[in-house]
Image (cartoon, rainbow, N blue to C red):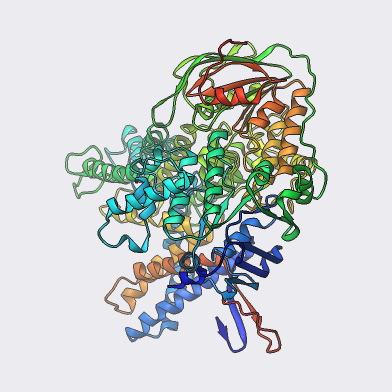
Amino acid sequence: MTIAGYEFRLEKRMALRSWEAALISLLAIVFALVLFSLIFILAGINPLSAYQEIFSYAFANQFGLPLTINRFIFLLLCTSAFIIPYRAGLWNIGMMGQLFFGMLGAFAVLLAFGAKESIHTQLPAALVIPLMLAAAALGGALLGAIAGFLKGKFNINEIVVTMILNFVASWIVAHMIKEGGPFMNPGGRGESFEIPPSAYAPLIAGTPFTILLALGIAVLLYFLFARTRIGYEIKAHGLSPAAARYAGISSLGIPLLVFILGGAIAGLAGYHYFAAVPGVYKIARNYGYFGDLAFYGIICGLISQGNPLAAIPVTLLFGGLSVGGRFVQGKLHMNFGVDYALLGVLMISLVAFQFFYRYKIAWTKISKESPDVGVSG
Amino acid sequence: MQTKLLEGIDRGQTVLEARGITKRFPGVVANDAIDFEIKVGEIHAILGENGAGKTTLMNILFGLYQPDEGAIYIGGQAVQFRSPLDAIDLGIGMVHQNRKLVPAHTVIENIILGHPRAGRVLNLRRTGAEIQELCEKYGFNLDLKAKVWQLSEGEKQVVEILKALYRGAKVLILDEPTSALAPPETKKLLASIEAMARDELAIVPFITHKLPIVLAVSDRVTVLRRGKVTARLQTEHVTEKSLAKEMVGREVIFRLERAKVEAGNPILRVENLTARSDKGFQALNGISFSVREGEILGIAGISGNGQHELAEVLAGLRKVEGGKVFFADQEITNASTLKRWQMGMGYIPAERVDVGSIGDFSLVENVTMNYYFDRKICRQGLVDYGQVRKLTEEITSEYGVAVPGPDTKAKNLSGGNLQKLILARVLSRQPRLIIANLPTQGLDVGATEFVQNKLMEAKKERAAVLLISEDLDEVLSLSDWVAPIYEGEFMGMIPGEGVDRESVGAMMAGSRPEVEI
């Protein structure tokens, strides 16, 4: 293509530096915001003030910021749960079911300690909270292991299995909290019993301690892939299962392992949202909404290209925009779901810009004197 | 119809001409001002090592690439190919080394696929008759109603040739036409090529490795080295040695010095082994043999006779159906692949791109494939990549793997360099047993010589080597014992020295010797 005396063409990138990847992602975000401002303009709203509202509510408001952080923790855990199988070449579409199983595990511990009887039950927090975490991880891992085993042993498609298990888990939750279900609220409002304050997760400056868990897991995963033998085996299996088998890497063990790890981390996301976020502390009636939100773990994982550290800014942005979008919709009386629309445009833009991970635009000035060699290109 | 361009050109006149072709890729000049011409009725071989620029030149002649400089002339007129379709319309046909056929379809269906006369309703009867005519003319013997997956490699190649001819090709470009063929198939193909040339077709086979074939059939040879034409020769004036020298740029030794090593204890012992192929057919029919320290056992066979399954069974990648396998004196019939590596097995697989390496991994990570479990490299679950990097640098320089650095991705390596890397990685473990499956397939003369020397060196260091090869000359020159394999059975076990080439060839084709030696 020729514009104003310059010839532009696409060239394949030989290597992508991490600052280039970051710059491309940043451009994609700016592009998405510019694109979405058209929608604000069509709705008769000044896009600049709309964005100001969104970002200031999400990141600088005393009510908005805690919401953002809680969603960030949730999304980061879900993203990590997606990334581990992803690096092994496998798709975990089952964070929803795994986090529900984690949630059920945590509440089962509470039930065993008699928390259902009364909200005033005094529970030994130092014992109960670690047990809840362990049960949550175990619950998620259990559901994940089914998919991993079926994949490794019989090569049954893991996408289908994890998807189906989402429905299974969803209905099991419905059964547990319905009238007469084991976790039912004594008031019978289609919710679970409430967690006694004595078992509330500790807060650090108003933020659940699970933030340390989520960030710690992201860092650990980065280390796992960069340095360890297990990480190497997962990566090798992900890039070429046949070559991994040749090298002696177990084609049953790796799928099983990554789904157990992924499931366990998704289980912790279930603990986080239903047992650690202030103001929730129960399996609320809208638990399905968070099941849906878990799917953003897939998108964030893909945008971060399977890099557990890159997932941190990505999930923070997605968490913030989902909170800010919902807020601005109410404030400006817009009649459509700004949060999901904005996330959707952002997602498409980020994915489209990944084209530039593989190609770059190069240009040369066309000089008039150069002989025409008669090659069409 | 542009095909008319070819009409009115008599035998011996130039039909296709390329002048000053230059093609650059990032970092390399693949073709540097190449002049090349082909005449009606001649067989014009192009010779060159991997990466010399043969494939690039042919892809330009076939319209897959556009040259950066230079032009192509057909019958004296300049032409420009925007895509292979233009080249096909002008009567140029290409038979690629990687078959581009639909396995589930019949021969006729494959040939007619994409043919402009196929139309909406297929007239398979008429087409069949026309193709049959072509077959008879050039001596191809082929069941046109057979499904392509049932065919041998040689037959698939014939299908590709027929496809090009049926499409009206007058200039036929054959990419390493004999590389996957057994000796008898090669002979038949060469006879057909000669028949086609008599029939005023111009044929360009390009061949890296098999110099005798160049000498046997071609009229002229153009030799390429590093993108430049280094020689244009009449075949009658050249010898194998002089050709190799032009191609490699130095003298090449053809006969390997067979190292004298006192064979020791058996390292690999196989008893009555049976196994099935991927499709469930019986691939191995009760094979027994042993390989001792300091000994090379060569398994010679035409592709698809069970040697591939044998290699996989021994590497722990395929299930054993019956029989036993011992390593030293330990039974490993059902041992995992990892266990075998740890015991001192080294496996060089035939599929160097899909199995032997990981394209998106750097060279360091590729070397890690055979070391991630090794205590020298991996302690407390942590891989010491610094040490692997040092090892990678050492072995790439020792083996002369031409790469910018250890962080290069394996997919950027040429076939020869990749094979050197795999060989270097496996041999650097100093394995007691080496299983080498088609270690020199598709490599050029220089790289082949190198790989064969390394296997001989390993034997000198008292490794037991199981060599699987379709190249009879390679098996005969390297092996202490030769076992021709046919339909999953050994046809005999013959000492490698002083063996009669013809009789081994006959055994590969299924005849048992009268007296077992």
Total numbered badges shown on the rendered structure: 0
- Residue A37 lies, in percent from the top left, at 41, 80
Residue appearing at x 74%, y 54% in the figure: B404
Write down the quadrant of residue A23 in the picture: bottom right
Residues B484 and B165: in front is: B165
Q: Quadrant of the C terminus of chain A?
A: bottom right
Q: Is residue B398 above or below residue B64?
A: above
Q: Hey, which quadrant is residue B120 in on the image?
A: bottom left
Q: Is residue A16 visible?
A: no
Q: Residue furthest right?
A: B251
| Left or right side of A160 for A88 | right
Of A236 and A148, nearer the camera is A236
Question: Which residue occupies the foreground of this view, A242 or A201?
Answer: A242
Residue at x-position 59% and y-position 32%: B470
Res B435 visible: yes
Q: Is residue A128 above or below residue B7?
A: above
Question: Position of A283 compared to A208: left or right?
Answer: left
Give how far across and how far down residue A47 sits, in percent.
41, 82
Q: Is residue A48 left or right of residue A109?
A: right
Q: Is residue B221 above or below residue B461?
A: below
Q: What is the x, y in percent for residue B191?
A: 55, 43
Residue drawn 34% across the image and 54% down it: A290
Q: Quadrant of the N terminus of chain A?
A: bottom right
How far across and how far down the image is residue B61, in percent? Answer: 58, 64
Q: Is residue A294 above or below residue A116?
A: below
| Viewer-proximal residue among A181 and B192 | B192
**Residue shown at 60% from the left, 39% from the top:** B356
The reply, left or right, for residue B436 in relation to residue B376 is left
